[in-house]
Image (cartoon, helix red, strand yellow):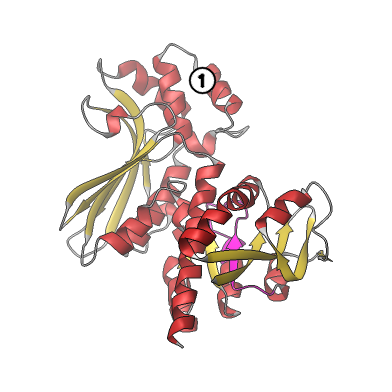
Amino acid sequence: MGTLRVAILGHGTVARATTELLAAIGPALREERGVTFRFTGALTLRRGGWLHPDGVSAELLRASGWPGSPAPGGAEPFSGDGLQFVRACAADVLVELTPLSPLDGEPARSHLEAALRRGMNVVTANKGPIAHALRPLRALARERGRRLLFESTVMDGAPLFNLRSRCLPGTRVLGVRGVLNSTSGHVSDRLARGDTLEAAIQDARRLGIAEADPSHDLDGWDSAVKAAVLANALMDADLRPQQVRREGCGGEALRAAVVAAPPGSRVRQLVEIARGENGSASALVRVRALDPGSVLASLRGMETAVTLTTDTMGDLTIVEGEGGPSQTAFGVIADLVELALARSVAERLE
């Protein structure tokens, strides 16, 4: 049975959902896949953290109530920053879950680089480092014989990147179309029902999918970061979010598009990525009315979807229902299971 030592950097909603879900499905993972996990450290940038030499199970970590209560028994307090935590923790994998910085991917990028240089594998749900530095991070991972996994960066736990790597051998992704921002989708549907823009945004806040300032979502920046991740990971591009064109985005533009939309259509913030003749990729985020009958036009509220155009299987579409922290957590756990299984295979071959 393979046991993976895990350290978590950033302990917000997704991290708590990860330990909750792992505690719930841990017995099934042990029985079905023969893998277990022990947490040797965790750090929240506001409340400090802890290190545990032997590690604790997800069940014990959940039962401890940390970070709302003292660290698990036997743990040593830790009060340094993220880079100091990476250098101090004894782990096989760093799970990086700090907040997104869309303009440069820091400090998460530096955290991942430091972990790889220390010989750890890394798992992240943070889009920033993948949008800004996938190529150098992948190169460093190969150099150190380690893995960089990021399934949860775009569509929560939907198996998007695993689909590409495991199920489409020898396949080129020629283009991508997707609706990837749940906040703008929900606001659009509320506008179509007659709500004012202010009321639609307030409802999105009530549901917990919109920040106090929703401009990051409505102005297309969230979709632009995801577009860069998709282009870089699926099409081997080297695109930055700042290079993704954004057309007709913003709350007022969304409201005007809903008013002008033909009957039966549905207005969405659409991501479109195309591969050029020279192999480069370009990406666009725009608000548009989608024709009735298309898969993307069938999405409602907070649902998201992405269509991959490939040279072997034509169009493949993944649709996700209303996502959330538990789905994002599942993507993190899927990456951890992948690493644990790979380690078990490597140990049997030694």
Indicate left or right for 110 with 240 as reference: right
Question: Which residue occupies the extreme top position in the image?
Answer: 194
Quarter residue 58 falls in: bottom right
Q: Position of residue 170 (x, y in %)?
A: 21, 67
Q: Relative to 155, does residue 138 appear above or below in the rendering?
A: below
Dominant SS of magenta comes to: loop
Q: To which residue does mark 1 refer?
A: 200
Q: Relative to 124, does residue 287 appear above or below in the rendering?
A: above
Rendered residue at 25%/33% (across/down): 295
Question: Which residue occupies the extreme bottom position in the image?
Answer: 350
Q: Position of residue 288 (x, y in %)?
A: 30, 30
Quarter residue 73 falls in: bottom right
Q: Identify the amino acid type marked 1.
A: Ala
Of residues 177 and 37, the one drawn nearer to the viewer in this rendering: 37
Q: Relative to 41, does residue 175 appear above or below in the rendering?
A: above
Quadrant where the N terminus lies? bottom right
Residue 10 makes an appearance in the image: no
Q: Position of residue 273 (x, y in %)?
A: 29, 50
Is 108 one of the magenta-colored residues?
A: yes
Rendered residue at 34%/30% (across/down): 299
Of residues 276 and 80, the one drawn nearer to the viewer in this rendering: 80
Rendered residue at 57%/55% (across/down): 27
The magenta stretch is 90-110
Indicate left or right for 350 with 65 as reference: left
Residue 6 makes an appearance in the image: yes
Is 148 one of the magenta-colored residues?
A: no
Q: Residues within 10 Å of mark 1 (few under 14, many from 20)?
A: many
Q: Position of residue 114 (x, y in %)?
A: 61, 74
Of residues 12 and 200, the one drawn nearer to the viewer in this rendering: 12
